[in-house]
Image (cartoon, rainbow, N blue to C red):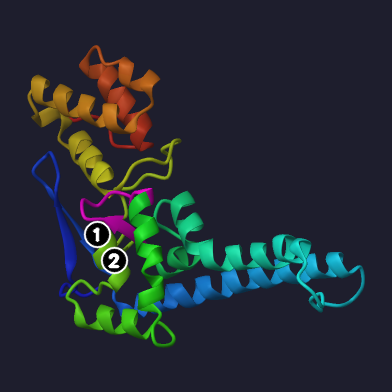
Amino acid sequence: MSGALPGLVIDSVTGIDVSLPVAGPGARAFAFLIDWHIRLILALAWFVAAALLYNGRLSLAAPAGNDALWFGAVLAPALAIYLLYHYVVELAMRGRTPGKRIAGVRIVARDGSAPSPGALLARNAFRVIDSLPLFYGVGFIAALMTREHLRIGDMAAGTLLVYEGVDTPALVSAAHPAGRLDAVGAEVLAELLARWGTLTPDARRRLARQLLERYASDADAADTRDDAGLHAQLERLAGPVQPPQA
């Protein structure tokens, strides 16, 4: 990636800045097209299967009159899948969708953490404006014109789209069982483990406890009696890491 990319710079508690390169309009469009095809296929699949079951024959025809069963079992679920796809999937995958994963991007809040449910709801509600007049014209123009390539929904929600894992491949560990490490937490954890032997005992214990209280389970966070125990808990949180420095 080019060094000229705009980025979200976050101060970590160790004093080391975390830089998350901001994704451009091209990556946005690529991720959206993939997700659009996925949600369209899912919605159509539901509609076809439910309509066939409703009609009891090879026909997708709607009933002549108003039928609550047709609306509730065939049409409404298909519309819900299409309209709520992004919000539900982004909420479940912490700012990601299948399309975003393939494009290598994800949604983050301004502090680099996973976006809140409220932020995701606001972001997706503003798709109505971003999609105007056709084919996300307003959103695409906004992403082209703003420095951080934000669409209207991002401006309203306080979110932005960043490249996943660019220039920091070793910071996010897939071995963390709870999957709760965000970009900032992964950066701080990696930095703390790398500098463990150079920090004063008080400083490393304080930082270790802050990390464990935020990202570890209650059972893990409770066992914080000595340096060796704290370091072992941090290793479990991060997955395979380098041993502490002498």
Q: What residue type is labelled 2?
A: Asp
Q: Name the residue under label 1.
A: 158
Q: In which quarter of the image is residue 228?
A: top left
Magenta-colored stretch includes residue 115: yes
In the image: residue 73, left or right of residue 2:
right
Residue 138 in picture, x, y percent from top left: 32, 83
The structure residue drawn at horizontal position 48% and vertical position 63%, both measured from the top left corner, is 86
Location of residue 111 with respect to 234 vertically, above or below? below
Residue extending furthest front? 65
Residue 36 tag number:
none
Quadrant where the C terminus is found in the figure:
top left
Residue 212 in picture, x, y percent from top left: 28, 28
Taking depth in this image into account, of 78 and 68 the one nearest to the observer is 68
Instruction: Please state the extent of the stretch shown in magenta in the rendering.
Output: 105-117
Q: In which quarter of the image is residue 149?
A: bottom left
Q: Distance between the residues labelled 2 and 1?
A: 6 Å
Residue 172 in picture, x, y percent from top left: 33, 47
Taking depth in this image into account, of 194 and 102 the one nearest to the observer is 102
Callout 1: SS: loop
Q: What residue type is labelled 1?
A: Gly
Q: Is residue 105 visible?
A: no
In the image: residue 44, left or right of residue 162:
right
The structure residue drawn at horizontal position 28% and vertical position 60%, both measured from the top left corner, is 157
Within 10 Å of the Cα at label 1, are there few (<14), some (14-19), or many (20+) other Cα atoms? some
The structure residue drawn at horizontal position 40% and vertical position 71%, both measured from the top left corner, is 127
The structure residue drawn at horizontal position 15% and vertical position 35%, both measured from the top left corner, is 195
* Circles 2, 1 touching at the beta carbon (< 8 Å): yes
Q: Can residue 200 be seen in this view?
A: yes
Within 10 Å of the Cα at label 2, are there few (<14), some (14-19), or many (20+) other Cα atoms? many
Residue 154 tag number:
2
Callout 2: SS: helix
Quadrant where the N terminus is found in the figure:
bottom left
